Image (cartoon, grey):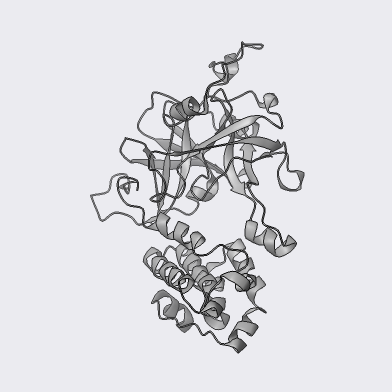
């Protein structure tokens, strides 16, 4: 308990001698496993006991603080990580020949990305929603953001479950609009899906591609709001192709794509050249883990849950959505004429009309 209190108070000092550095190598795998499992208190405890004064360990402390919803503390630790990256003492940071001490993370870029998201400010940052029936109070603290998209004009929004998991409050913000409180009305942790409901109606909603039309080699477009506060607040568009029709270990719920994604893209739509939803952004291959396992850094290995799985989730929750010919699912016509191919710019312009920022706040 005393160690945890010291962590929460930011009263941490990490050594950096040859003996400590050698001992740290014995615990690196355990630290990474705690990070991957989201075991934040265990990660913080291990770094306090066995960590060394380099940017990786301060980054781990930042991740632990962020996971425990201690955002001010996370900023403090991330800043310490950045300072270590700038150190002139090569033995103290994760650059050059000492990358083996860094588990494949690219410093200081990875820390800047986390810090930028925490430091997101208006107009990019969603306003904290007030709980229903509550008096105006101090705003909730923003924990993280993701992307979501409207699937019916009555106010149904889908995103990833991990974006809204354990949130005290949730908001949804469309570009150029105001932040609206959102209620999580259904979730499917197994498929990493969550259904939100907002009170405001929308003029436009996503339209789904027929599930059997997805092919390896098809061009895809991703629209979302990654790295909030660092990249454009109006949204970010990337292009790529479907590289495989299954995910990790041949998981047929997913498809693999080369369109780049970043922190904050989670829950956003993956669209075909006609602007129809083919999937929902879910995850990317962990480059740091692959570096440790294979010695090689994987690039643009990203995964999306197929539209068919998402539609089943919506069907089970009685959400009425549109298919590729614009008709409702129960009255969609077989053999409808194909929708014209659009430019990526036009697809992104349309996607911005039904895609927004999902904010997760500490309760």
The quadrant in which the C terminus is found is bottom left
Say which quarter of the image contains residue 100: bottom right
Q: Is residue 194 visible?
A: yes
Nearer to the camera, 65 or 109: 109
Q: Left or right: 215 with respect to 318?
A: right
> At x 45% / y 26%, what residue is drawn?
350
> At x 41% / y 56%, what residue is drawn?
116
Q: Is residue 362 visible?
A: no
- The residue lying furthest to the right in this view is 250
Measured as percent of width and height from the top left, residue 22 is found at 64, 84
Measured as percent of width and height from the top left, residue 132 is found at 32, 44
Measured as percent of width and height from the top left, residue 341 is found at 57, 19
Nearer to the camera, 214 or 178: 214
Say which quarter of the image contains residue 203: top left
> At x 43% / y 36%, what residue is drawn?
197
Q: Is residue 362 above or below residue 179?
A: below
- The residue lying furthest to the left in this view is 136
Measured as percent of width and height from the top left, residue 92 is found at 53, 78
């Amino acid at each position: 308990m005393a160690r945890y209190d010291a962590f929460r108070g930011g009263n941490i000092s990490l050594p950096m001698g040859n003996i400590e550095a050698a001992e740290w190598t014995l615990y690196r795998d355990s630290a990474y496993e705690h990070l991957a499992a989201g075991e934040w208190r265990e990660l913080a405890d291990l770094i306090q006991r066995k960590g060394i004064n380099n940017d990786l360990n301060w980054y781990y402390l930042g991740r632990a603080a962020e996971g425990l919803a201690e955002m001010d503390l996370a900023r403090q630790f991330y800043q310490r990580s950045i300072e270590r990256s700038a150190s002139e003492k090569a033995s103290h940071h994760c650059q050059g020949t000492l990358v083996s001490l860094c588990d494949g993370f690219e410093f200081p870029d990875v820390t800047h990305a986390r810090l930028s998201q925490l430091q997101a400010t208006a107009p990019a940052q969603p306003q904290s929603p007030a709980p229903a029936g509550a008096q105006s109070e101090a705003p909730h603290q923003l924990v993280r953001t993701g992307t979501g998209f409207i699937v019916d004009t009555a106010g149904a929004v889908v995103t990833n479950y991990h974006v809204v998991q354990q949130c005290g409050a949730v908001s949804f913000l469309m570009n150029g609009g105001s932040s609206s409180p959102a209620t999580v009305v259904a979730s499917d942790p197994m498929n990493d899906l969550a259904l939100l409901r907002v009170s405001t109606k929308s003029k436009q909603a996503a339209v789904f591609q027929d599930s059997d039309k997805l092919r390896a080699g098809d061009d895809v477009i991703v629209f979302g709001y990654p790295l909030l506060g660092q990249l454009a607040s109006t949204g970010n568009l990337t292009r790529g192709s479907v590289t495989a029709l299954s995910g990790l270990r041949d998981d047929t719920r997913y498809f693999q794509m080369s369109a780049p994604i970043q922190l904050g893209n989670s829950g956003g739509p993956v669209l075909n050249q006609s602007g129809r939803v083919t999937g929902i952004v879910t995850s990317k291959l962990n480059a740091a883990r692959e570096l440790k396992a294979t010695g090689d850094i994987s690039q643009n290995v990203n995964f999306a849950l197929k539209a068919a799985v998402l539609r089943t989730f919506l069907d089970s929750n009685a959400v009425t959505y549109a298919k590729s010919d614009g008709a409702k699912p129960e009255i969609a016509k077989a053999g409808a004429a194909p929708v014209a191919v659009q430019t990526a710019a036009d697809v992104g312009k349309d996607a911005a009309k039904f895609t927004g920022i999902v904010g997760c706040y500490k309760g």
